Amino acid sequence: MRKIAAVVVATGMLAACGGATGDDGKAGSGGPGGSLPSAQKSLVKAPEGFDTSKGWQQAVSWVSEDAESMPVGAAPEAGVVAFLQKRGEDYVVEARDAATGAPRWSSKAWRPPVLPDNVAPDEAYLPRLLVVNEGDREYVAVWAYTPHFTDKDTVSLVLYPADSSGEGIAPAHARSLPIDAYGPAKVVDGGSGLLVSWEDKGTSYAAAVDPTKDHVQTYDESLELPVCQEEVACIGGSVDGLSPDGPVIGLDPGGFGVPGIWQSFDAVPPGASATKSGRWGNGVVRHILDDHVLSEWEADRDPARPEETTVAAAHDLKTGKLKASVRCDTEDGDGVSFQPMVSPNGRYAVAGTVAMDLEQGKAYCLQDNGEQESVRLMSVGDDGIAYGLQRASSQRVPVAVTLGTGKVEPLPKGTHIPSLSLPRAAGFSLPSPDGNGLLFTFHPRR
C-alpha cells in the first residue's frame, strides 16, 4: 500500500452515513457509520463501480469551493482519512476510519503563527495537511507558511503518526523553520520525507525533513550532479525530490538525478535525447509520485506527430531506472485543474493527459490527436480504472479510462468523478448544500 496525496481542510462535521456527528467532532446518537438513511441520500452520482447506498460524508465549511488543493488526506496503510478541523484560532487533526467514518484519533490543538498586521489573509497562508510515508510508517503533517517582511519568514509544521489511536495525540515532531523567502514557500511529499522549498533573489533553497528522526537537512543551489556531459551546462539547480540515497537535483538547463547514485542522462526515454535543442541538458522533474519521479523531456522532432512536443516519463526514485514513457504534453491543463496521483497500491499513475501502468511499463497519451478529444485524468484506483473529464466542444464529459488498454469510455451525463481513491472506496467532493465550503462523500467499491 502507498500514500495518497492531500492538503488543507475542514470544520463542521456532518452526517456520517447512518449517523451524525456534531461540530465538536464527537459521534452523535446515530453512530459513525452504516447505510445511508433515505433522508440522507447521497448527492453523488457516482460511476457504476461504486455503491452510493453506503458510505459516509463530511462537510468542510472553511475551505472555498475553488481551493487550489484537495482538503483531505488518506493514509491507506493505517486505513484512515485525515481532516484538519478548525476550532477558533486553533486546528485539530481528526482521523476517521476510511471504510466507516468512525473516529480513530484526534490531535492536540495546534495554532499556526499569527499573520503580521500588514499581511492580508491569503490562501497561501492557510494551514495545509499532507500524508507522507517514511520507512514503514505513514505520517500526517500539518504545515503553514507565515511571511514577516521585516524578519525571516517561517514554515511551521507538526507531524503525527497516522496509525495513532485515542484523543489529544501530541505531535511526534514539531518544527519551525526560519527562511529568507521571496514569495510563498511550499511543503510537498518529496518521496523520502517532507520537502520544503523556497526562493530568494533568484536562488532556490530547500530543506528535507525526516519524520522518523526529527532531522532537517538544508540545501542551496551549489549542489550539482557530479557527472555531466561536455555539451551540458551543470550550473545552478534545485532540489526537486528526496530519494533514499539523497536529494534529487534538477539542473537549471535540464537534466536531473541523485549525486553519486544516478543521473537522467543514463535513462533517456525513447523519442527524446540527452541534450535539448543540440546544446543544453534535457529532462525536468515535474512531480514526485510515491517512489517514482515523473519527468518531462523535449521530444525529438517527428513530422508525423508535430503536436507531440514533449515526452512524459516515470523513473524509479531510488535507481533512476526508466519505468514507462510516452510522447505527450502533461502540463496542458486545457482549463481543467488536476493533481498527479498514484493508485493506493502504487501500480498506476495519472497526471493530466498521461496515464501509466508502472508495473507493466505501459503509458498512454490522452492528448487531442485529431481523432480523440483531450482527457484530463483526476484519479486512479487499484483496479487500473482512471476517471477524468474529456473535452467535447465547449463542454467537459466525464469518462473512465481502463489502463490495461487505454480505452476511453464516456460516462452518463452528470456523473461525478472521484477525487480520492482508496483501496476499497473513493472520495467525491461537491459544493456543500448549505453553500458553505465542500461536502466530501466516501462510497465503497462494489
Image: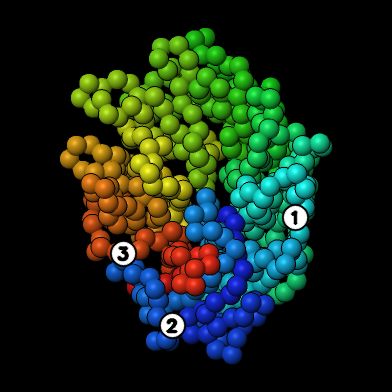
User: What x and y, as percent, mark residue 353?
Assistant: 34, 42
Mark 1 / mark 2, whichever is N-terminal? 2
Query: Closest to the observer: 14 or 168?
Result: 14
| Residue situated furthest left in the rendering | 371
Q: Which residue is mark 1?
A: 112
Determine contact: label 3, label 1, CB under 8 Å.
Answer: no
Is 430 situated left or right of 102 in this image? left
Amino acid type at circle 2 is Gln
Count the marks.
Answer: 3
Q: Label 3 to label 1, Cα distance in Å?
A: 38 Å
Q: Which mark is residue 415?
A: 3
- The quadrant where residue 22 appears: bottom right
Q: Residue at x 53, y 39 (%)?
A: 317
Image point (39%, 24%), residue name: 298
**Residue found 39% across the figure and 55% down from its top:** 380
User: Is label 2 in contact with label 3 (beta carbons under 8 Å)?
Assistant: no
Question: Farthest right residue?
Answer: 151
Which mark is first along the chain, 3 or 2? 2
Kind of residue indicated by mark 3: Thr
Q: Is residue 404 left or right of residue 320?
A: left
- Residue type highlighted by circle 1: Pro
